[in-house]
Image (spheres, rainbow, N blue to C red):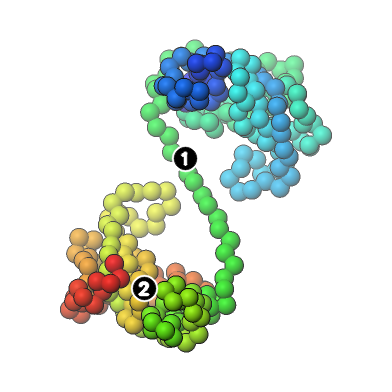
Amino acid sequence: MTELRARRVVGIRGSDGRVHVPPVEYDPVTAAPLTEFVEVGTEGTVVTWTWMATPLEGQPFDRPFGWAMVLLDGADTPMLHAVDVVESAELSTGMRVRIRWAATPGGGIHDIECFEPVTGRAPSAASGAVVDAVSGITTPVRLDVVHSVSPEESRYLRGLAEGRLLAQRCPRCLKVYIPPRGACPVDGVPTVEEVELPDTGTVTTFCIVNVPFLGQRIPPPYVAAYVLLDGADIAFLHLVLGCPADEVRMGMRVRAVWKQRSEWGTTLENIDHFTPSGEPDAAFDTYAGHL
């Protein structure tokens, strides 16, 4: 990362003589730590590629581009990066490309803005200045999940849009599940009896969040807790606010604080958080089986 900030690329030599780019910490053959860094070129050859006709959010470009495995001169393993060309016909296995450096280096892989076809224009020069070592980087991670809900989940989510907490009861063991599963995980029988639960419950276990992270909407410290709704046999995770974090405890009685009705959708986020209800703490044996 430090060398990238200085517009240089280094690999590391393994026990078999191969130069790995990006560098690996341990030898892929012997598993021994590696220490011999080797500077490689800023030009290379496309080993294989694919075309990104419709870029996704967060990708290097908002226009079509190529992903390619590029074998830099002096390296023995290729690295993955974007190649900036107008159309896929400009990309081919064996074509020569070179690094286009980012205008403002930061000490990370994004210092390589992309690769571009080799032309007559001279490449950007490396910096001769000594730079401070990069000791850490921040790498945001995002995961989008598309979930197809079951009929039981659909009923539960539509109930939330009406301000209702809908569960289902097993006809055999009589356990009440929220969100409903459609079948009891204990007995394996269908759960068809619908039960509407109140929006009050008990904190079973909890965690005080003290560490800030990207996208955090509440300044720490705050509490994420498992809340066992009255009449339910399974707890779910939600926020507990409305009191200092160090006052939250197991057995604390809480009630839901709903968002404005105009903000409701088919999601548990309709409940903004839970807050202490002021009732006496629940006895341990009332929730001991739900920890």
Q: Which residue is mark 2?
A: 234
On the image, the x and y values in percent for residue 60 come to: 62, 39
Pick whichever, 242 or 171, lies toward us.
171
Whether residue 199 is visible to the viewer of this picture, yes or no, is no
User: Is 212 rendered above or below residue 81?
Assistant: below
Q: How many marks?
A: 2
Q: Residue at x 27, y 64 (%)?
A: 205
Circle 2 crowding by C-alpha within 10 Å: few under 14, some 14–19, many from 20: some
| Label 1 SS | loop
Any mark on residue 130, and which?
Answer: none
- The Cα–Cα distance between marks 2 and 1, rounded to whole angstroms, is 35 Å
Residue type, label 2? Ile
Left/right placement of residue 253 relative to residue 169 reads: left
Residue at mark 1: 139
Q: Earlier in the sequence, mark 2 or mark 1?
A: 1
| Identity, as a three-letter code, of the amino acid under mark 1 | Thr
Q: Position of residue 263 (x, y in %)?
A: 48, 73
**Residue most extreme to the right:** 89
| Rendered view: 26 above or below 138 | above
For the point 30% across and 77% down, the residue is 201
